[in-house]
Image: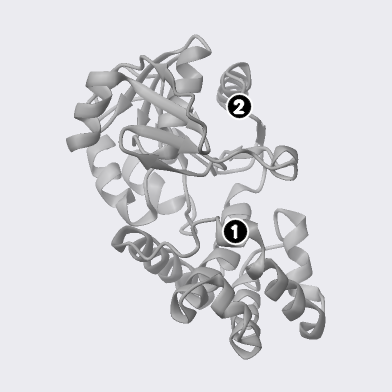
Amino acid sequence: MKILVYGAGVLGSVHAARLHEGGHDVSLLARGERLAALRRHGVRLAEGDSPAVHTVPVPVVEHPADGYDLTVVFVRTHQVDAVLESLADVGGDVLFLLNWAGGFAPLGAVLGLERVLLGFGVVGGTIDGDVVRYRRVSRLARLLPMPIGEPDGRATPRLDRIVGAFRAAGLHVKAEPRMDAWLTTHAAFEVPLGQAVHAAGGPVALADDPAAVREMLRAMRAHLATVPGPTVPGAFAALRTLPEGLLVPVLRRFLRSPTAVQSGLSDDSPSAVAELDRLAAQLRSRRRDPR
C-alpha cells in the first residue's frame, strides 16, 4: 500500500516509521524545521527517556500529491480545515486519526464521504530536538486498540485493508462500528477535563478543589448526553450513571496520579488551547442539534 502520513509530530512520526518498517511505501509530510531535520536524519525514535535512539529512513515530502492509496492525517483539530483544502484535489482514501467531535459530514462535504474514514491515535510523547520520545504503553493501554471506522459503521473491504496494514506493521488497531460516537464520547471527557485543568493551573491544583471537579463532571455529563446510544468506549458510561458523590473522589485521585500529571494535561501552548476551543465548539454544536 502506498501511504502518505500527513503530519510529522509524535503520532505521525511513530506511525510513519512503523508502517515503513512494515513494508509499505510510506512518505511523511512535514514543514519548516521539522522537514529539514527529517531530511537530514530520518525519523528518530526513543522510548521515554531512553538514550537508545532508533532511526528509520522514511522519505519526506513538503506537499500532498496524487498517487497515494491512503493519506493518514495526524494534526490538531483546529488544523483540519487547512488539511481539507490541501487534499480536496488529491485522490485516494483519507483516514483522520485525531481528536474530532464534528462528525463525518464536514469532512465528506470537502473530500466526498466515500473517501473519508475516522479514527483515534493512542500514542503519546514529545519531540526532543529531532528525537521523538514516545511514552511507554501502559498495561491498560495495551488492552485498548486504536479504533478506525467507516461513516456508516460497516465493515468494508477498504477498512479491512487498512486495519490489516496497520496490524501487519505491529500496530494495535480494530474496526469500530460507532466511530463518531467513540470520538464524541472521548471529546466529552477530554474538553471539560482540559479546560478545568488549565483554569486551575494543573491537575493537582484541580484535584484540591472538589467544587471545580464537580462542575467539570457536570459539564462532561452534559456533553455525553448528546452521544446517540451507549457511550463508546463503554467504560465512560460510569460518568453518566454513577452518583457524583462517588465519581468526584475517583476523579480527584485520577488528577493526582502519575498518569494525569504526565499526560500532557498541563500543556497550555497556543496549539493545545486552540484544539480544545475547536473541540468545545463542536460539542456545543452537538448540544444545539444532537442529531
Residue visible at 27% across and 25% down in the picture = 38
Residue 121: x and y in percent read: 53, 41
**Nearer to the camera, 124 or 256:** 256
Check disc 2 and give the amino acid type. Answer: Leu
Check disc 1 and give the amino acid type. Answer: His
Label 1: state its secondary structure.
helix
Sequence-first disc among 2 and 1: 2
144 displayed left or right of 263:
right
Name the front one of labels 2 and 1. 2
Label 2: state its secondary structure.
loop
Q: Quadrant of residue 45?
A: top left
Q: Is residue 87 above or below residue 183?
A: above
Residue visible at 54% across and 73% down in the picture = 192
In the picture of the structure, the residue carrying the numbered disc 1 is: 186
Residue 234: x and y in percent read: 76, 56
In the picture of the structure, the residue carrying the numbered disc 2 is: 171
Q: Residue 153 shows which numbered tag?
A: none
Residue 68: x and y in percent read: 35, 19
Q: Residue furthest bottom?
A: 211
Residue visible at 64% across and 58% down in the picture = 258
